[in-house]
Image (tube, rainbow, N blue to C red):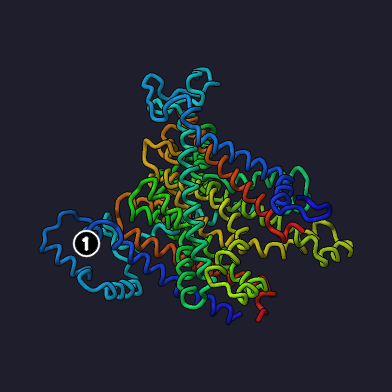
Amino acid sequence: MAVPGAAPHPLLEFWGDFRRNPGAVAGLAVVLLMTLIAIFADTIAPHEPNEQYRDALLLPPVWSAQGSADFILGTDDIGRDILSRILHGARVSLSIGFLVVTLALVTGVLLGLVAGFARGVLDIFIMRSMDVMLALPSLLLAIVIVAILGPNLINAAMAVVIVQLPHFARLTRAAVINERAKDYVTASRVSGAGVTRLMFITVLPNCMAPVIIQGTLGFSTAVLDLAALGFLGMGAQPPTSEWGTMLSNALQFIQRAPWVVTFPGLAILLVVLAFNLLGDGLRDALDPKLKR
Amino acid sequence: MFRFLFTRIILIIPTFFGVTLLTFALIRLVPGDPVELLVGERGIDPARHAMLRAELGLDKPLLAQYAIYIKQLIGGDLGHSIVTKEPVLNEFLALFPATVEISVCAILFALAVGIPVGIIAAVRRGSIFDYASMGLSLTGYSMPIFWWALLLILLFSVNLGWTPVSGRISVLYYFEPATGFMLIDSWLSGESGAFRSAVRHLALPSVTLGTIPLAIVARMTRSSMLEVLNEDYVRTARAKGLAPWRVVVVHALRNALIPVVTVIGLAVGVLFTGAILTETIFAWPGVGKWLVESVRRRDYPVLQGGVLLVAGVVMLVNLLVDVLYGLINPRLRYQR
């Protein structure tokens, strides 16, 4: 119940801050739209993503003179409907992206939490390992992991998890160390709270803001890295309708059929941009330093 | 300053050893027989297999193998490519200048465009220019650069015919590489048109690779300018009656650029990730393309050695940036 003059509920306050940022709201709208597309891809896609229409090879989009209303964004070199492939690609990118961010977040946060609480040798071991992973350029590390595991979508996803994990670990550790010194933690400890309780119930919820922001921004890098691996032939394999994989042999059609190149990349850009806008908006709304 | 440098170097050593553990493990983690992976032959007869196994030291305990690996590394021996039989280090050194060349051009492009854009956006905060340029920066930051490269090729190579699509220079020109940097070599060669050809080949890859750093630099310059413009000394400079451009460029910019330098240093990893993609698309004979091909050809010694060298370079650049940061930021130098 709202008491006049009392501070609004934190969630309401957050929404009030978030709503004032038009970019963030637009990002959220695109993310929700893409999620719906990913869920209902089967229903809304006009064709099967892998169905080959042999009499409609490299058909241009509907608005050009030779275009057909059957294939709104045209067809690729073996007559597959590009729109349907992009809609199904949303399913691949978003579901794998979600998997990647969840796994990286959970493992990274656990490692960071343990490092921040344990200190000493364990802390040094965990954080030095993270430094090693961060010393390699992200895509190179991902390529190395794919080279070990073999090129397919799941292995590429695992590679991206490992690439992202150190960021979550570092962020969580820093937040934990910052929180641990505060009075409420000491109070809780003095009242007899065990280490597990201190870690997960007392401290962790107060470290979540930066982790949530990093999770949103991590989603955009996950989508981007997965597409890059697909493009290099080290991620999803044909005929999977993954956006990066769709671009992997597009260079040879660039002269004859630019639409084969244009639309999958536009889809990647749109999703990545949406998550970045959303992440920026969350940062502005969640960061108390910027707020007041 | 010396102490600061010293601690940074001390910190880098364990990380580098961590990377050697990773590259050491690489060959042993790949499914398949390490002898066959290292020699690149399949179905070797048992006698030869045992000989090679002993020769490669694979019959020794793991710890001894690692010690041998480190000893070889210190001696500059990073193994031989299965495909070309060349030492990995020689191949790397031959290709590295090409990667440095596009990376430097990309960074220069990013700075030349990003800093002025960031300054103007900060000075005219809230204007249409501010919104448009920051919107574009976020778009650039979100750009899948392999797709961006294809769009640039579509516009500038296919439609306008201004730039070539691949390689470092036209096949019409040939000269012995003196420095490994095509811009310098073509200039030194004195062949008419060679330099122009090199520039035309370099343009699109540099712009492609420079796009994400450009977005980062523009955003960073703007936000750090906004902070500095509120400082007292800037107000003092204005109050003295200095010309507005002088206040911005001479007084504010010098301090605003400090965080920008760090960001560029941190962007080295981002830059190499971009170089892998850019070099692959533009058939640019650099380290990134070389590593991607080594995976495709299952040339594991190249991947192993190349990863270590790239990691070493990235760490060194980060160290240099830290030192540079200490030099240009006296506040940091005199701390502690």
Q: Determine the chain carrying the residue at label 1.
A: B
The quarter of the rendered structure image containing the C terminus of chain B is bottom right
The quarter of the rendered structure image containing the N terminus of chain B is bottom right
Report x, y in % for residue A222: 50, 49
> Is A126 on the left-hand or right-hand side of B304?
right
Report x, y in % for residue B140: 60, 46
Residue at image point 55% right, 21% down:
A63
The answer to whether residue B282 is seen in the rendering is: yes
> Is B4 on the left-hand or right-hand side of B252?
left
Residue at image point 25% right, 58% down:
B37
Report x, y in % for residue A171: 57, 63
Report x, y in % for residue B63: 29, 75
> Is A113 on the left-hand or right-hand side of B84?
right
A92 vs A101: above or below: above
* Quarter of image, res B156: top right
Residue at image point 57% right, 48% down:
B211
**Depth check, front residue: A43 or B128:** A43
Residue at image point 53% right, 60% down:
A168
Amino acid carrying label 1: it is Val
Q: Is mark 1 on a helix, strand or loop?
A: helix
Q: Which residue is tagged 1?
A: B35
**Depth check, front residue: B58 or A180:** A180
